[in-house]
Image: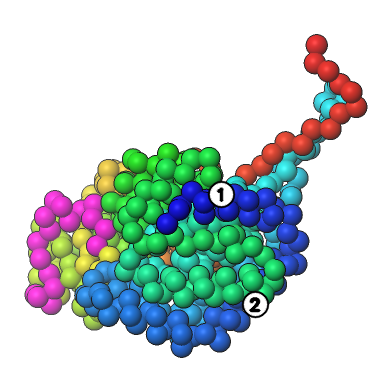
Amino acid sequence: MDHNANFIKARQAARKLVVLEEAKINAVLTALATLLIQKTELIVSANEKDLSRMDKAAPNYDRLLLNEARIEAIAADLQNVAALPSPLNKVRAERTQPNGLQLKKLSVPLGVVGVIYEARPNVTIDVFSLCFKTGNVCILKGGSDASFSNEVLMALIHETLDEHGIDRSAALLLPPDRSAATALMEAAGYVDVLIPRGSQGLINHVRSHSKVPVIETGAGIVHTYFDATGDIEKGKAIIANAKTRRVSVCNALDCLLVHENRLAELPSLLAPLAEKNVRLFADEAAFEALKDHYPAQLLSPAEPTHFGTEFLSLQMAVKIVTGLDEALDHIAALSSKHSEAIISEDRINQERFQQEVDAAAVYVNASTAFTDGAQFGLGAEIGISTQKLHARGPMGLEELTSYKWLVKGDGQTRP
């Protein structure tokens, strides 16, 4: 495949998208949402081909799965994005200089956005919806695990674009082979920004080899600290939800830190996890507190490597700490700066935790499962950035824009 030819078409399409009316953009997104529902059987059939090639026990199996309910949720996110106000052509700053020059700082699209992702076919629609809403062309390179699903979803995107007279180069799906990823990483001059979504290995590879500027959407090594004043009922619900709601996502809980004064309540705090067959890797103090109260087949002594691990499964590390300071030190050393939480009724500790923890999302008395573009009111997300340049946390419409300065004069020259 001539990737450069496709990249040139994408760049040309970006010039057309920038002048597309908001009403037409919203009409395309709404029509695509309707088409997804109508083609549910076709999508599920393609997805089953992908699933048949993957071990059900693999962490990515759940991420790969599409069913009627998930397709309905994807369509609903499309509708949500369509309903959001456009972030384009907004005046971010405006001033008139003493020399009479009139300046405006205007929000504009990034241009051409490349995304390299693994076994998550919902990303195909999420990325298209957010990019299209913001006047950006998207070039997608999905993993081979989801190739059948991605191809049918892109076909439906192209069908919708065709019906509305829009160049289908506004959304391109590259082949799932590695050469396509290499071409995308080397597409400086054609692609404005590259966003990897997937394992830490994928992210590290893209960061190390890309000639295109990269926005990292990092892995989630997520902690929750149960403080000396933590409410036991809140804690049980929050911890169970953060760990078991959906184990394969990046905001799922990986390590629970518990104040030593609450050690006696640890069996009660973790009882809901036993019901969900969560395997625990407990440090010495936690193991002693749990060994006669938690299923033996689900309880093991922790090794150092269990701390700082993103499990993506029904597994979790548990560590007893002397207080907030030790919890903060542990998180600072091992966090991936994605999502971190404290369960506490102490206002000072709550404020210290939120001020001192360096992460994209920092919670008080709530589940880290909420780190999600839709949950944050962004409609959907293109990823969750764990870096600090340009974007951080769930990336929605605003994060897919840049700006330019418009300068209007009346013959001024600079002395």
Q: Which quarter of the figure is the N terminus placed in?
A: bottom left
Mark 2 vs mark 1: in front: 1
The residue located at (80%, 11%) in the rendering is 415
Give SS at disc 1: helix
**Crowd around label 1: few <14 · some 14–19 · many ≥20 (10 Å):** some
Which mark is first along the chain, 1 or 2? 1
Answer left or right for 32 relative to 119.
Answer: right
x%, y% of residue 400?
A: 58, 52
Can residue 230 be seen by looking at this rendering? no
Task: Report x, y in % for residue 209.
Answer: 35, 41
Q: Which residue is mark 1?
A: 8
Q: Is residue 184 magenta?
A: no
**Residue at the limit of the structure toward the top, as seen here:** 415
Q: Residues within 10 Å of mark 2 (few under 14, many from 20)?
A: some
Q: Which residue is more in the foreground, 326 or 73?
A: 73
Q: Residue at x 62, y 44 (%)?
A: 402
Which residue is located at x 24 percent, y 52 percent? 308
Circle 1: residue type: Ile
Image position of 68 (left or right of 52): right
Residue under the point 36% across and 70% down: 146
Name the disc covering residue 404, or none.
Answer: none
Give the amino acid type for the residue marked by disc 2 in the picture: Ala
Task: Mark yes or no: residue 312 visible.
Answer: yes
> In the displayed structure, does residue 157 sit left or right of residue 150?
right
Horizontal and vertical percent position of residue 226: 31, 60
Q: How many marks?
A: 2
Query: What's the magenta region?
Result: 295-311
Q: Which secondary structure, mark 2?
A: helix
Q: Which residue was labeled with disc 2?
A: 31
Q: Is residue 273 above or below residue 192?
A: below
Q: Disc 2 versus disc 1: distance between alpha carbons?
A: 27 Å
Residue 70 occupies quadrant = bottom left
